Amino acid sequence: MEGWSNALTSESCGLRIVLPSMTRLILTLLAAAATPLMAVDKVDVFPAGMGGVALYRIPGVVVTEKGTVLAYCEARKNSSADWGEIEIHLRRSSDGGRTWEAPQHIAHHAARLEGNPRKKDETGAREQTVNNPVAIVDRDTGAIEFLYCINYARCFSMRSTDDGLTWSDPVDITASFEPLRKRYPWTVIATGPGHGIQMKSGRLVVPIWLAYGKEGDHSPSASATLYSDDHGKTWQAGEVAVPNEGEYVNPNETMIATLSDNRVMLLTRSVSKPNRKIITTSADGATGWNTPAFHPDLWEPVCMGSIASHPSVAGTLLFSCPRRVSDKPAGRGKREQLSIMLSRDDGKTWPVVKLLEDGPSAYSDLTVLPDGTVLCLYEGNKTIKAARFGLDWLTQP
């Protein structure tokens, strides 16, 4: 074997130790694992063309109670469009996102619900758009609750009790959205995207958005939450958190995090004039949302951005989003220069900014591994990548 001819010799206590190169490699990897990440490790998780899929989009990622990483996204079979033949695919990693198991098609395994209102021909009539996947890890049960939508018109939930290996039959929970119709007579509904959270009380909370224009239109829109107090058996709608009113224009694609005092923070995309993300908080994740506010530090290129809490120090938050913002009020920036930001005061200020991907980069989702390593699953150039880094990388000069 080639490795045995290239050996490392060492003297210890008068003994001459010979370490084959394979052993040396193992020791090097172990040493690297024990060293804080001062650089970024990146790997393609859902490259375009894998499994015959035209493009993978809308990433989400969570870490289970056993430490397994679950990465999921929309598998857009034939094109990059939001509408079309789309499935939800998932990959598992048992080594913190370094390597990944083969992808599995996890949704929608039930009767097909066909019909693309954006494509009125025969092809469109046969298409099923499965969209906006969101996972929530239940620390009390160890299960992973998973929500997704079909044709932006129906919402389903399912559950895994074996760390994402298999999933239960989907349950239609569209009725949970009905109370919101009194405020906004929605024609489109969507979860997340990204991930949900569990509060200290055990409540599961998932951000949602709804649109109430013409069939299939994603605007005008507003943002709210769904919540469950029985570990995902049933879901209820919270109050509208970010309305489409006044200076808040078409809020949608909302991300969520828990603050140090257990309040829930929503971070919302919009096309408002300040070109900044909208922030609002609630004590229970469902009601009593405070007056939304544009955060001066969190730029808005009109692209979904992710937020997550980090357990290192109370009040530590992470944020990811492209930073090519338009210089015109309510203008669309470019989906480039995906950056990571750090707050140590529950999101009041964001003094640390670090570039993660300089080129094309769009939607992203953040999670934290048991050892504190951060994992960002994000859209790059015709791929979805996983980037691993530590807070040391984020805070080094």
Image (tube, helix red, strand yellow):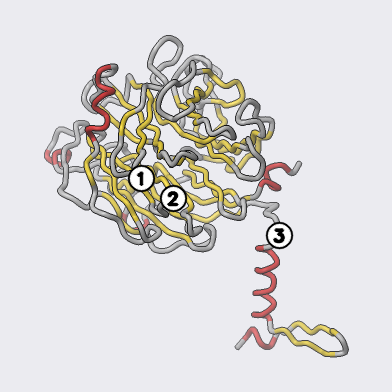
Q: In the image, which disc is placed on residue 140?
A: 2
Tell me which residue sits at (48%, 52%) in the image. 63
Outermost residue, top side: 246
Residue closest to the eye, 55 or 185: 185
Label 1, label 2: how far apart the Cα atoms are: 8 Å
Label 2, label 3: how far apart the Cα atoms are: 31 Å
Of marks 2 and 3, which one's residue comes earlier in the chain? 3
Outermost residue, right side: 14
Name the quadrant of the N terminus: bottom right
Can you say whether 75 is above or below 181 in the image? below
Q: Amino acid at mark 2?
A: Asp
Determine contact: label 1, label 2, CB under 8 Å: yes
The residue that disc 1 covers is 231
Q: Position of residue 191 (x, y in %)?
A: 34, 35
Element marked by disc 1? loop
Q: Amino acid at mark 3?
A: Thr
Tell me which residue sits at (52%, 30%) in the image. 263
The residue that disc 3 covers is 35
Tell me which residue sits at (68%, 80%) in the image. 21
Can you say whether 192 is above or below 171 in the image? above
Q: Amino acid at mark 1?
A: His
Q: Nearer the viewer, mark 1 or mark 3?
A: 1
